Image: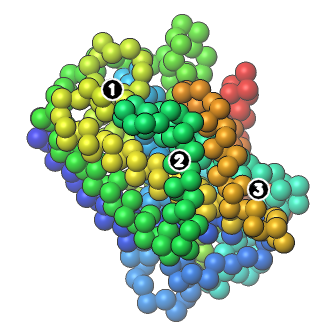
Amino acid sequence: MKVLILLSLLIVNVVQSYALLPSISKIHLSNKLRHSFALSSSQSITSSSTSTSSTTSTSSASSVLSSAAFIAGTTIGGGFLSLPLTTFPLGFVPSVIGLLFSWLYLLGSALSLSKATINIMKRNQSLNTGDNISVFAIAKDTFGNLAGIIAAGLFIILMLSTLVAQLSKIGILLPSLNMLFNKEIAIASFALFMSIVTFGRGIQFAERINNILTLTMMIAFGSIITAAPKAGFDFSRLFYRSNFRSLLPFNYESSITWAVPVFLQLLVYTETIPLVVSRLNGDEKRIKKAIIIGSLIPLLMCIIWTMIAIGLVPVDIAVIDPVDILLKSSPSKRIKSSLLLLTLSAVSTTVIGSCLTISQFLDDILKEKKILSKPLSIIPASLIAALGSRSLYYAATRFAGAFPVTLLWGLFPPMALLKTLERESLPTSPQKNVGQYMLIFLSLSMLIINII
């Protein structure tokens, strides 16, 4: 049985490694995301890796796979490390159910946004031109200038929350390695080092570093999978605990935080949808295939990571971070070293992308004071992380999923689609729009629950 599990894990890991490395790097992605939220709706993507035209020689199948790899590569990052802390107290089966629910919710929203994007691009006659429509432009087109500004604000909050979470993790990790760091010095030193890497020698240097980090992350993840059977992996632990109540938002009998917002933050990829629509020329069938395939890869990785963490950590351990337990007390040196590499590389690649995205976004706002963009991209997050508690890593991850992700990537897409259908008088019916109303209801319900 363990051989079959190991084989399946290796196959998925190879698929992910193949998908990630040729895809657009997170450095390039950060530039694209800045354009996706730029304060001008006329921005377009000129990079050959994202622009598509009717004269492209790339086959339909390869375009779909390339777009799927783009989605998958965007999703996996430093937040991946918070998953075991969420899933360990739930147990394997409830965790898989929660991940599947979150995946389906985000899939529905992504498909809604893709259709809204197609409708607007058709109206503007921008399909098959290589031009990219920004999320800001979609919000502005459907609900006015204020909606566009709100979307941009939510995006900045999301990126800031992500950066705070990653720096908080470093503030926990480095002191635990018996280095000469306390939390504050660890965060300040890491932030300074990553700033130099990101901004010191230009985007091409940062891209090369990012590619190395991505490769390191995937090798480390594969190493953990292959080492698990000999490091005390116990299949029976997967079914020892099944805390289904913790999947419910109101669980007064348990101190475990509602897991769904964390799952949403880990699996979100909706920011890539306008770019995917552009590169696939608005072909709904190909776009749908790319979204499903691309989003399934991170889902499978999260399920695998949950399985490994629960199977390696003794069931009688109190509710603390299984990653910390494995780093400190795993009997396998290979697990320890691989997990350390996974942690450092995952956090670093996310910090590089987040800093570059925020700084480029601020460039559009500050204009003549662009010199402030780079320090403002990391100093506020560093201060918040340094002044926060040890639980800030998890809290920031959960906050991002509970509010910015739910508002921007859960509630907005179905509303935008309904607005485009209504405005263009496109053929539809209340029955066909049931899915959109369900997404709106779920999003509003989750927002209310998270506020309460």
Q: Which residue is mark 1?
A: 325
On screen, 431 above or below 89?
A: below
Badge 3: residue crowd in 10 Å (few <14, some 14–19, many ≥20): many
What is the three-letter code of the residue carrying label 1?
Answer: Ile
Where residue 365 appears, as percent x and y from the top left, is 81, 64
* Residue farthest along the top direction in this orientation: 253
> Looking at the image, do the residues carrying marks 3 and 2 touch, with CB atoms under 8 Å apart?
no
> In the rendered structure, which disc, 1 or 2, sits on the residue that comes first in sequence?
2
Badge 2: residue crowd in 10 Å (few <14, some 14–19, many ≥20): some
What is the three-letter code of the residue carrying label 2?
Answer: Ser
Residue 375 occupies which quadrant of the picture?
bottom right
What is the three-letter code of the residue carrying label 3?
Answer: Ala
> In the rendered structure, which disc, 1 or 3, sits on the residue that comes first in sequence?
3
**Residue name at image x 41 percent, y 26 percent:** 321
Q: Which residue is mark 2?
A: 189
**Residue name at image x 19 percent, y 37 percent:** 333
Where residue 146 appears, as percent x and y from the top left, is 88, 55
Identify the element where label 3 is drawn. Answer: helix
Which of the two residues, 43 or 120, is positioned nearer the viewer here? 43
Q: Which residue is mark 3?
A: 152
> In the rendered structure, which disc, 3 or 2, sits on the residue that comes first in sequence?
3
Closer to the eye: label 1 or 2: 2
What's the CA distance linking mark 1 and mark 2? 25 Å
Which of the two residues, 179 or 388, is positioned nearer the viewer here? 179
Which of the two residues, 386 or 449, is positioned nearer the viewer here? 386
Closer to the eye: label 3 or 2: 2
